[in-house]
Image (cartoon, rainbow, N blue to C red):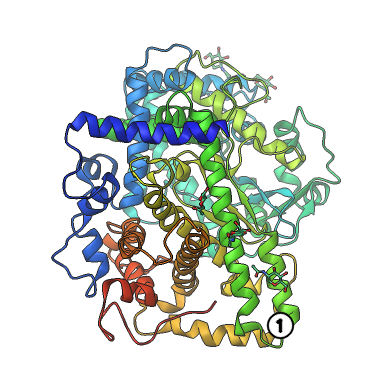
């Protein structure tokens, strides 16, 4: 109760301060919330011709566009969040804040003081006799040890070891052993050239003479190209993983790779057993690798492995970039290495001293929204013709919906140690050292998950992701922290409760509903975690209705169909939920307010202002699962009769086509 009062009074206070501060109450009857909407609009374009252009015609990413690569409304939210963090790090003198310590250390070290010695020492310290500083020959080095040691820092060597959900049962994490990605080497001459040059820089920093560094860099590239050739063309994409095997079995099939020793090094402080530890592997690659290593040059192999460590930490890779990009880079590192503390700091900066209370309150709002959407959707499932004479499937669908969960992140306790690992280390060292410590802690935690320890950091904690996810196998929607820090939830500029509700419903409500509908798109009905596949009759009826989303209005329809379904069905669900919550309230008038409906459609459209990332590429839309922002907005709204009614679009006009798609 207390929390609620605080939340609203903070909102009210903000509005009061604004009004008093400016000195003139809004004159033309618009409140601040509407002004925000109006700012992006191009009223010259009639809403019935092209609503996206009408709603977003004046949208502009401003200086953010140049500095943070902002291209649309969502990337602008992220840029603003980052900017707040950077401002804080640069102004704070607070020595207690380890995030700031990390940032300042790295930012000031970059280019000048970053030192390769740290990485070399780390490898030497591993006992692998692993050094080329001072031209040591690496004949005695132990590549098996080095290959494993790399992974304890989160880096990958001759193969990639991932910790992922088991393909059979999502609850269980297992190890995956896959081929490397060869990301820096790439596939063409230019990337190869750049990579060779980068290797040369690394070697020179290790005090190898220029001529020799040049020669070695070439050898290293050749070595990596041979590794790359072990992969059949494009297999990475088509790889179907086989059933997981025990480590014991693998060890028998691949003796030269000494996988047991590899895992012994990785899991040295943990309880495990080679006869039960499960690993899913890319066997073709590992077998080719085993053959290849028989004749590989040891010195080059060792040097290649040694350089993987600084490369993993992108040593000096960003030294030439603009200052702004470098700042961005270090915030991204914090996001990766310390997402929990970063998320908490972000909420504190955004919401002020009472951030915990305000945050808890907004989470509660989201939970209510989720509950209302579920009820509304359930009513649709109860009535849909898709399940006529098919009570069993109707019940199945209802149960799936009822079982759906919403995962919202909890803010990390400020008393919690800043470092994420059990052996928390204060960040006192150089930038390189700090990075290695944090990365090591993170890798440890990840490995421990296979032993059944819960993840310290779930996906949802990410403070800079402004998307939501539906996880099919878990039947769960995840809302990352970043999304909950956006104006969708945290903008107290609307003066009336009614305006606030419109914003919440058309913004976050749409996103939640969109994810919810993914549980009932083509993938959703064909893979049902609890019930298996739907019977054919229901699928056919579903398909007959879904066919509308293949119509001429949709480009790339076959690829985008699930997204298009979720878009329209989701917005309609959000809209109908908004409406019915309103109708249910005796305090509101029974007539819907057309201005509020207009706001609803504008708020939705404006979450899509700008261009999607791939719109600027050579093949627009081709690699995307989503249509362009413009197409999305216009197609979705054109499917809603209430939209045409609100803006009085003539039948057959662009935004009021005859064929309107509706499945549920
Ligand atoms: C490191 O080198 C020394 C001397 O060359 C050798 O005795 C030792 O066994 C080597 N250690 C490993 C782990 O290979
Ligand atoms: C590298 O060589 C130097 C002498 O040249 C020696 O002192 C050092 O122990 C060697 N390091 C390793 C890891 O073999
Ligand atoms: C849907 O139908 C079931 C079974 O008749 C009923 O229990 C439930 O209350 C209905 N849900 C809604 C939201 O109408
Ligand atoms: C409508 O209001 C009644 C009484 O306040 C409540 O019991 C009911 O759950 C509400 N319906 C919806 C859909 O919110
Ligand atoms: C309905 O009105 C009551 C008070 O009249 C209010 O507490 C409640 O939040 C309103 N519900 C919605 C969904 O706005």
Relative to 533, is 36 above or below? Answer: above
Going 26% across and 60% down the picture, which residue do you hit?
616
Residue 59: x and y, percent?
Answer: 22, 53
- Residue nearest the viewer, comparing 609 with 271: 609
Seen from the viewer's position, the closer of residues 6 and 235 is 6
- Asked whether the viewer can see residue 314, the reply is no
> How far across and how far down the image is residue 334, in percent?
46, 31
Residue 324 horizontal/vertical position (percent): 27, 33
Q: Which residue is mark 1?
A: 535
Q: Residue at x 45, y 16 (%)?
A: 430
The image quadrant of residue 656 is bottom left
10 Å neighbourhood of mark 1: few (<14), some, or many (≥20)?
few
Vertical comparison of 185 with 11: above or below:
below
Secondary structure of residue under mark 1: loop
Q: Give left or right: position of 530 versus 333.
A: right
Q: Quadrant of ligand 1?
A: top right
In the foreground, 13 or 384? 13
The residue that appears at 45% across and 33% down in the rendered structure is 333
């Amino acid at each position: 109760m207390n929390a609620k009062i605080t939340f609203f009074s903070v909102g009210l206070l903000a509005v009061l301060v604004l009004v008093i501060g400016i000195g003139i109450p809004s004159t033309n009857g618009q409140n601040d919330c509407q002004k925000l909407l109006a700012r992006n609009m191009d009223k010259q374009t009639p809403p019935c011709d092209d609503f996206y252009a009408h709603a977003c015609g004046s949208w502009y990413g401003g200086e953010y566009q140049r500095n943070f690569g902002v291209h649309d409304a969502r990337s602008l939210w992220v840029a603003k969040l980052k900017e707040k963090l950077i401002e804080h790090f640069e102004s704070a003198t607070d020595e207690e804040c380890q995030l700031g310590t990390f940032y300042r250390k790295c930012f000031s070290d970059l280019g000048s003081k970053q030192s390769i010695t740290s990485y070399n020492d780390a490898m030497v310290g591993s006992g692998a006799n692993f050094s080329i500083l001072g031209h040591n020959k690496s004949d005695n080095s132990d590549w098996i040890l080095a290959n494993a040691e790399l992974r304890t820092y989160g880096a990958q060597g001759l193969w990639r070891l991932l910790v992922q959900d088991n393909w059979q049962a999502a609850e269980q994490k297992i190890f995956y052993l896959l081929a490397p990605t060869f990301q820096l080497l790439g596939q063409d001459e230019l990337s190869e050239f750049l990579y060779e040059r980068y290797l040369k820089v690394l070697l020179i920093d290790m005090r190898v003479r220029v001529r020799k560094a040049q020669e070695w860099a070439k050898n290293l590239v050749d070595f990596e190209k041979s590794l790359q050739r072990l992969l059949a063309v494009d297999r990475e994409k088509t790889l179907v993983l086989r059933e997981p095997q025990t480590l014991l079995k693998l060890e028998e099939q691949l003796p030269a790779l000494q996988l047991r020793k590899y895992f012994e090094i990785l899991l040295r402080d943990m309880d495990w057993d080679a006869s039960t530890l499960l690993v899913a592997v890319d066997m073709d690659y590992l077998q080719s690798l085993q053959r290849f290593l028989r004749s590989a040059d040891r010195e080059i192999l060792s040097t290649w492995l040694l350089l993987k460590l600084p490369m993993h930490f992108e040593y000096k890779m960003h030294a030439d970039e603009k200052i702004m990009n470098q700042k961005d880079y270090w915030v991204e590192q914090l996001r990766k290495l310390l997402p929990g503390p970063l998320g908490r700091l972000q909420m504190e900066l955004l919401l002020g001293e009472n951030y915990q209370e305000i945050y808890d309150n907004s989470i509660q709002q989201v939970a209510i929204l989720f509950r209302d959407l579920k009820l509304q959707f359930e009513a649709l499932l109860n009535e849909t013709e898709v399940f006529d004479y098919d009570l069993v499937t109707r019940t199945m669908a209802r149960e799936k919906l009822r079982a759906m969960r919403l995962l919202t992140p909890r803010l990390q306790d400020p008393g919690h140690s800043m470092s994420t690992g059990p052996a928390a280390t204060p960040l006192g060292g150089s930038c390189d050292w700090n990075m290695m410590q944090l990365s090591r802690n993170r890798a440890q935690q990840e490995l421990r998950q296979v032993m059944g320890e819960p993840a310290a950091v779930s996906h949802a904690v990410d403070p800079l992701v402004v998307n939501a996810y539906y996880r099919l196998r878990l039947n769960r929607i995840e809302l990352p922290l970043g999304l909950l820090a956006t104006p969708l939830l945290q903008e107290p500029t609307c003066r009336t409760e009614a305006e606030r509700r419109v914003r919440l419903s058309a913004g976050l409500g749409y996103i939640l509903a969109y994810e919810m509908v993914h549980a009932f798109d083509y993938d959703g009905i064909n893979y049902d975690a609890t019930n298996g596949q739907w019977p054919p009759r229901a699928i056919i009826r579903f398909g007959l209705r879904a066919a509308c989303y293949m119509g001429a209005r949709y480009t790339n329809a076959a690829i985008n169909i699930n997204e298009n379904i979720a878009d329209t069905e989701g917005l309609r669900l959000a809209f109908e939920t908004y409406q019915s919550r309103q109708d249910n309230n005796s305090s509101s008038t029974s007539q819907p307010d057309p201005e509020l409906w207009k706001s609803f459609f504008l708020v939705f459209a404006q979450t899509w202002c700008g261009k999607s990332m791939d719109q600027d590429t050579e093949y627009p839309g081709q690699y995307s699962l989503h249509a362009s922002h413009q197409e999305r907005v216009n197609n979705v709204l054109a499917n809603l009769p209430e939209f045409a009614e609100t803006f009085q679009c003539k039948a057959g006009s662009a935004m009021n086509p005859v064929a309107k798609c509706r499945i549920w």
